[in-house]
Image (tube, helix red, strand yellow):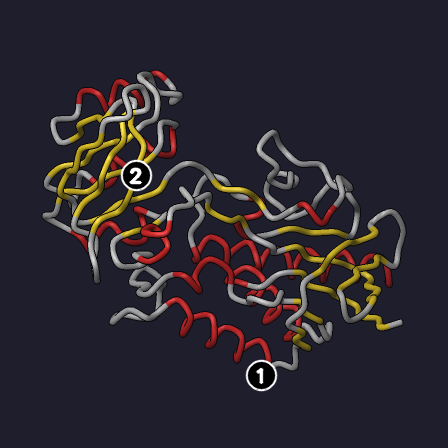
Amino acid sequence: MDHTRVLIIGSGPAGYTAAIYAARAELSPTMLSGLVAGGQLMLTTEVENFPGFPNGISGPDLMAQLQAQAERFETRMMAEDVTEVDLSKRPFTAKTSERTMTADTVILSTGASARWMGIPSEERLMNKGVSACATCDGFFFREKAMAVVGGGDTALEEALFLTRFASKVTVIHRRDELRASKIMQDRALKHEKIEFAWNAVVDEVLGEDEVTGVRLKDTQTGDTREIELGAVFIAIGHTPNTGFLGGQLEVDDAGYIKVEAGTTRTSVEGVFACGDVIDPHYRQAITAAGTGCMAAIDAERWLAEKEG
C-alpha cells in the first residue's frame, strides 16, 4: 500500500499551488494529477490576466511552469485518474487503475468542466473564437460582434461583460423566455448593445481558421439563418468533477463541494477542497490558485493539531 501525508487529487492552478505550499512545508505531498493534467487552462491559448506575466502566457505553458515549481520542491507527481475514494475512515484511500493510495489528509482540486453544445464545428474552432470564458477571452475580440449561448444568470453576466469590448452581443437562447434572475434580465434587456435570438440553437459555427459567424436553427419552425460574428461564448453551465466521490462529501444543488466559509474544510474532517470544484462564481486561475494556497495551509494546520 502506497501512503502519503498529503494527497492532492487533481491539478490546475489550485492543485499545483496546493502542492507548492504543502511541499515547502515539508509535508511531502503526492499529486494524482489525472491523465490530462492542468485543468481547463490546457484549452486556453493565451492568458493575459494572471499576475506576473505582463506579455501574457499560454495556458499550457502556465500549467507547465506551475508543475515544474511544484516538482522543484519534490512534489511526487502521478498522471493517473482517481476512480474512487474512501473518505469514511483515516487514513483515507484513493484508487486509480494503477494503484491504491492511502493518505493522512486529502486536498481535492478536480475542477469543473464547461458544458459544450456538442457540435463538430464548436470543437474545431475552440480557442479560435469559441470559448467558455468571456472574462478570459472577450478582450481578444474587441470591436467585433459576439454571441453568448445560454439563458441563465451566467449567460447574461457574460453578455453584459462583453459589451465593454463588442460592437454588439447576441444572446442565443433555445426558448422564448430567460431562466435568469429578474434583475439580470432587466439589465440585459435594457442594454443597447445586447440583442436576443429567441427560440434558437446553434446549428453550426462558421469559419475555417477563425469564427466568422453562426448558423442558427429555429427550435419551433426548423428554419435556419446566419449571423456574422467574431466570437461565440458558451454559457450553458459547468459540471463540477465530483462523480468519483460517490456522495461522501456535502455538495450544493449544482454539485459543487461545500466548504466552511473562509476555509477549504469540507464536511469530512481532514479533507479539503479548492479551485473550481468549490467555485461556481469566479472560475479564474488566480482565484483557484488562492484557494489552493488556503487548502495547503489548512491541511498543514490540521495535521499539526492531530500529530501534536
- At label 2, counting other C-alpha atoms closer than 10 Å, the crowd grade (few under 14, some 14-19, many 20 or more) is some
According to the picture, the residue beneath numbered tag 1 turns out to be: 72
Q: Which mark is residue 284?
A: none
91 sits left or right of 238 in the view: right
Q: Which mark is residue 203?
A: 2
Distance, label 2 to label 1, CA atoms, is 47 Å
Q: Measured from the top left, where is residue 241 in percent x and y?
A: 60, 48
- Depth check, front residue: 205 or 100: 205
Q: Secondary structure at mark 1?
A: helix
- Depth check, front residue: 148 or 273: 148
Sequence order check, earlier mark of 2 and 1: 1
Total numbered labels placed on residues in the image: 2
Amino acid residing under circle 1? Arg
Q: Measured from the top left, where is residue 129 in percent x and y?
A: 25, 54
Considering the image in quadrants, where does the N terminus appear?
A: bottom right
21 sits left or right of 218 in the view: right
94 sits left or right of 59 in the view: right
Quarter of the view holding residue 208: bottom left
Amino acid residing under circle 2? Asp
Identify the residue at image location x=84%, y=57%. 92
Q: Secondary structure at mark 2?
A: strand
Closest to the camera, between mark 2 and mark 1, is 2
288 sits left or right of 297 in the view: left
Identify the residue at image location x=39%, y=27%. 152
Identify the residue at image location x=22%, y=42%. 214
| As drawn, 135 above or below 105 | above
| As drawn, 204 above or below 209 | above
Identify the residue at image location x=38%, y=22%. 180
Q: Measured from the top left, where is residue 154 in percent x and y?
A: 38, 34
- Depth check, front residue: 76 or 36: 36
